[in-house]
Amino acid sequence: TQLLEQSPQFLSIQEGENLTVYCNSSSVFSSLQWYRQEPGEGPVLLVTVVTGGEVKKLKRLTFQFGDARKDSSLHITAAQPGDTGLYLCAGYNNDMRFGAGTRLTVKP
Amino acid sequence: KAGVTQTPRYLIKTRGQQVTLSCSPISGHRSVSWYQQTPGQGLQFLFEYFSETQRNKGNFPGRFSGRQFSNSRSEMNVSTLELGDSALYLCASSSGFTGRTGELFFGEGSRLTVL
């Protein structure tokens, strides 16, 4: 059983569409991170959220941390083929625990 | 500055053998964490070392061990390899003084295949 549950597990969309990926847990985290991993590479940090209810924007990506610091969402606007990859959420409490990831494919 | 370096990138072993993987963290980083990534289980935390001491440990059997040297470089060892140990092993470095945030910087991983 994963400490962090991500949904959906797989997502295939057309270029230009919007999408939201969810990360849920029954545990409270002091912070939560989102990473993106491309084939043959290690995960790369996208954002860190710390405060309950916090919203951060990174160009077309919007990240939200739940009020209770147990869940998070990642929204991508007007997805592009370059957004294709494995999106991982990770919760931090003394060590980092990862969700299983959402594998996103954006078709041109 | 240089990123996290893992060696070897690829290796093939047979059941019963043992393997040692190496990780050089970002210069100045004192914490090194190891993760196992498989398609079925995702990223599973193995252990974290900080200043040559194991600071945290995940739920893996004793066949998985690690150590950290005074220059912060780390090695992990898997003994008596099993088929299920086939995975991408990722090393991540951080400053170790993370407070509430814990951001990690990953290497490209070592892909182990056990036959």
Image: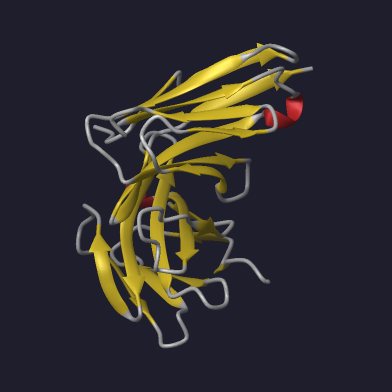
Residue B16 visible in the displayed image = no
Q: Quadrant location of residue B10?
A: bottom right
- Foreground of the two, B50 or A56: A56
Residue A68 visible in the displayed image = yes
- Foreground of the two, B12 or B85: B85
Q: Quadrant location of residue B3?
A: bottom right
- Colour logic: secondary structure
Q: Where does the image place residue A25, in percent across and percent down from the top left? A: 28, 30
Question: With A53 as the anchor, is A81 left or right in this view?
Answer: right
Quadrant of the frame with the C terminus of chain A: top right
Question: With A16 as the anchor, is B95 left or right in this view?
Answer: left
Which residue is located at x 38 percent, y 35 percent?
A: A99
Q: Where does the image place residue B49, in percent across and percent down from the top left? A: 34, 71
Residue projecting furthest to the bottom: B70
Which residue is located at x 63 percent, y 41 percent?
A: A39
Q: Where does the image place residue B20, in percent across and percent down from the top left? A: 42, 71
Quadrant of the frame with the N terminus of chain A: top left
Which residue is located at x 64 percent, y 22 percent?
A: A105
Is A39 above or below relative to A25? below
Q: Quadrant location of residue A85?
A: top right
- Foreground of the two, B92 or B86: B92
**Count of marks overlaid on the render:** 0
Q: Where does the image place residue A8, in percent across and percent down from the top left? A: 45, 18
Is A2 above or below relative to B91? above
Is B87 above or below relative to A9? below
